Image (tube, helix red, strand yellow):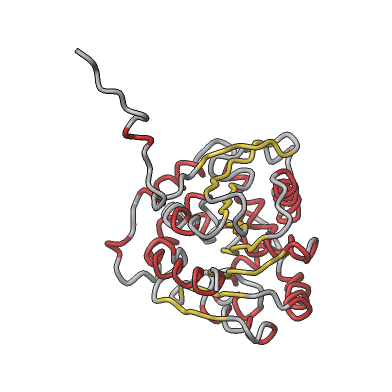
Amino acid sequence: MTSAILSEPPATRVSSSAAPKVRYNTVKVDDVDIFYREAGASTSPVLLLLHGFPTSSNMFRNVIVQLARTFRVIAPDYPGYGFSGMPDHKTFEYTFANMTEVMDKFVKKLSLERYIVYLMDYGAPIGLRLALKHPEQIAGLIVQNGNAYEEGLREFWDPIKKYWKEPTPENFKGLFLDDPNAIKWQYTNGVPDLTLLDPVTWTVDKCLMDRLGNAEIQLDMLYDYGTNPPLYPDFQAFFRKYQPPTLIVWGKNDTVFPAEGAVPYKRDLPEAEIHLIDTGHFALETHADEIVSYIQEFFGPR
């Protein structure tokens, strides 16, 4: 009796329309392991996704595969976030300047010469500091609830500004970091339909932030955020000089970075396209397909 011979196992017979595979890698930057997600052809335009607080590259999990049909998508975790290394805050500077240095070295490690950068929350000042260092590398900007204008720092920031001036235990009390429900609130605030939210998101974020030593890291970063507003004029000068193609997709109900921070981009980037979306801070949790569509239409092949 002869046995049937298959030229290849069924699992390997993949059609050309199959979804791109996401790969999960780690690269050493100085002495820190930087975890990142990657998908898409190496010959495609690069899209660098920079995450916000208090999350990681996990915030992009719903869009990476879709975007990878057009782009080479790379989404790193910063030190102290996600699955990257978490050096002690006494020996590693958890500042936006140092995070920028780490991301700059990460970009060099991966030989990324030019890329579109997705700016979200903490990712905005990190990505824009990168732009100031290497304006020739920036092929475009996608801004999602990422601030670069004073108009975007409204009432939510008043107690934080007070803490920047006087980082005392008294001024820390009442800050959102002092609230055990703060992480979940960032996901739910401003979202009309809460049934669209996956509770795994804030659960994972909280587990990672509850690691021994991580609270000090987050406090260092929150305090150092005060170094970003003084750079807003430099960011704006970069916009005016280089006029990078810019797409703004903004959760308009966000309390942390409200829609008042989105509109001023048009002052310096008159060709920017703005979409104010009826959701909160983490717009990708509820409007991933819509945002992917905007990105594909704006930056995809013509």
Rendered view: 163 above or below 98 = below
Locate the C terminus by quadrant. bottom right
Residue 222 shown left or right of residue 109 in the figure: left
Which residue occupies the extreme top position in the image? 1
Question: Hey, which residue is sitting farthest left in the picture?
Answer: 1
Give how far across and how far down residue 201 sits, in percent.
Answer: 40, 51
Q: Nearer the viewer, residue 55 or 221?
A: 55
Taking 77 as reference, is 277 above or below it?
below
Query: Which one is nearer the viewer's eye here, 169 or 229?
Result: 229
Is residue 247 something that shows in the picture? yes
* The quadrant where residue 141 appears: bottom right
- Pinpoint residue 285: horizontal percent, then vertical percent: 40, 61
Judge from the rendering whether residue 60 lies leftward or rightward of residue 154; answer left or right. Answer: left
User: Does 9 sit above or below residue 296?
Assistant: above
- Quadrant containing the N terminus is top left
The answer to whether any part of residue 170 appears in the image is no
Instruction: Out of 197 and 300, give the one closest to the viewer.
Output: 300
Q: Position of residue 99 (x, y in %)?
A: 70, 51
Res 268 → quadrant: bottom right
Using the image, determine if residue 286 lies above or below residue 151. Answer: above
Identify the residue at image location x=50%, y=69%.
296
The outermost residue toward the front is 2
Where residue 107 sits: x, y (%)? 71, 50
